[in-house]
Image (tube, rainbow, N blue to C red):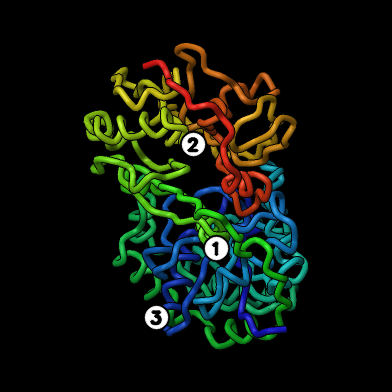
Amino acid sequence: MIQLPRIAVGTVQRSADMQVMTWALMNVLERSGVHVQLFSPQSRFATRDAALRITGQSRRHLDSWLMTPETCIELFSRGTRFADIGLVEGQYDVARQAFRGGGSLDTLCQWLDLPSLVTIDARLLDAGHPLPLPSGAVGLLLDNVADVAELCRLQTEFEALCGIPVLGWLDRLTQLRAVVSDLLPDDDPTPELCHALGDALAPCLRLEQLLQIASQRPFSEAQCQLFRHRCLARPLRVAVAFDNAFNCYFPDALDALESQGATVSVFSPLQGDCLPGEPDVVYLGSGRPEEYLDRLAANCCIKESLWNHVISGGRIYAESAGLAYLCREIVMPGGDHWPMVGLLPALARRNPSPAADRPVEITVAKDSWLFSRNDRVCGYLNSKWIIHPDGCLVPLVAEAEHSHDLVGDHQIVGSRLHLNFAACPRPLAKFFEPCNATRLNPVR
């Protein structure tokens, strides 16, 4: 047993937006000298993510759908090793009835023995209809409170009916919320905005009581399995695309690769001229290539380097935006075509109205370097890019409706699913196995 301060903060209202309260809370904790590690209860990338901006550490991901309890405990314990408190933020199950599937915050609260705070948007309250609270709720945070009179009324009602304290509140903050609303989906808030939100919450937050709640439960660590070092005859060399166009990766997945003996280096498809060293695997993650299409199209050196990598027997895994980059062209909603790498015979069309990522489970129908036939693959499907075959594009999936969601050949795997390899022990192990594919000569 160890002392590991931790807490869950979630909403029970389907249409409530928790971002303002979460950003304000993290800012207050950090300014008070309490270093925060933020976690999501699902392995999907957040929009308008302020974690790195406020805490200096990227958001990490837990997922009761993808992971075992032991894996979640291990990832949580390892992820908080440089923090003073672990904060898991999301929706409780009663707020997710219309979006069933994927990881559950309630389940994580059970597995990790998390005390639960509930954020309640005062504007969404319906008189005469009490809110269902998750079991184990220990405190309330009131958001969008009109004035002190409404605060006193709500505090009296909730503390009398629920028997749990109100630990903090935010008023309407009309101007600050307007700034938040004007942020684009992929924009992160500025430090000034986060600090202003913290200023609003700080005098209204019972910080000492919150920290006492977070610190009162001991924590049982799991045995280290995911990060156990492998004895390799030769280190696995993984080249990861990382720049403004490609920067969405699950930190635990990269940590697991390095801990098990891989040498991870980075390169930039935007401005690099070659791959670093002689990598065994190139990993192209998600991101925002649509904002840099002219530079990606013009960088012929890195595209040639990727072709040479595959021709010489190297492996590639490309996800979402990385998959689009490997196609022959990216087509934007206005009709503009931009030439990309061309290792996959397809066009990647930018979806002007992508849906929220959704949990999907598919069956592998064809062997590749990363998957074996009949493997079950679970991840969150990203609809930002629509793949149109422009030649003999090989689907790797049995289900016809997902035929272009996992594509490639023995050496190249492209996925529209976000896959957290920290939750996928078999594909993670495949990184370390030698590739038996014959060296290919793709047709340009």
Q: Secondary structure at mark 1?
A: helix
Crowd tier of the residue under label 1, counting other residues whose Cα lies within 10 Å: few below 14, some 14–19, many 20 or above: some
Crowd tier of the residue under label 3, counting other residues whose Cα lies within 10 Å: few below 14, some 14–19, many 20 or above: some
Residue appearing at x 50%, y 38% in the figure: 317
Residue kind at label 2, given as amino acid type:
Arg
Q: Secondary structure at mark 3?
A: helix
Residue appearing at x 49%, y 65% in the figure: 21
Q: CA distance from mark 1 to mark 3?
A: 32 Å
Q: CA distance from mark 1 to mark 2?
A: 20 Å
Up-down relation of residue 71 to residue 206 (above or below): above
In the picture of the structure, the residue carrying the numbered disc 2 is 315
Q: Secondary structure at mark 2?
A: strand
Q: Position of residue 50 (x, y in %)?
A: 41, 61
Nearer the observer, 434 or 80 = 434
Nearer the observer, 96 or 220 = 220
Query: Exactly how many numbered labels are in the figure?
Result: 3
Q: Position of residue 277 (x, y in %)?
A: 35, 48
In the picture of the structure, the residue carrying the numbered disc 1 is 259
In the picture of the structure, the residue carrying the numbered disc 3 is 31
Residue kind at label 3, given as amino acid type:
Arg
The C terminus: image quadrant: top left
Between label 1 and label 3, give the one nearer the viewer: 1
Q: Position of residue 143 (x, y in %)?
A: 52, 65
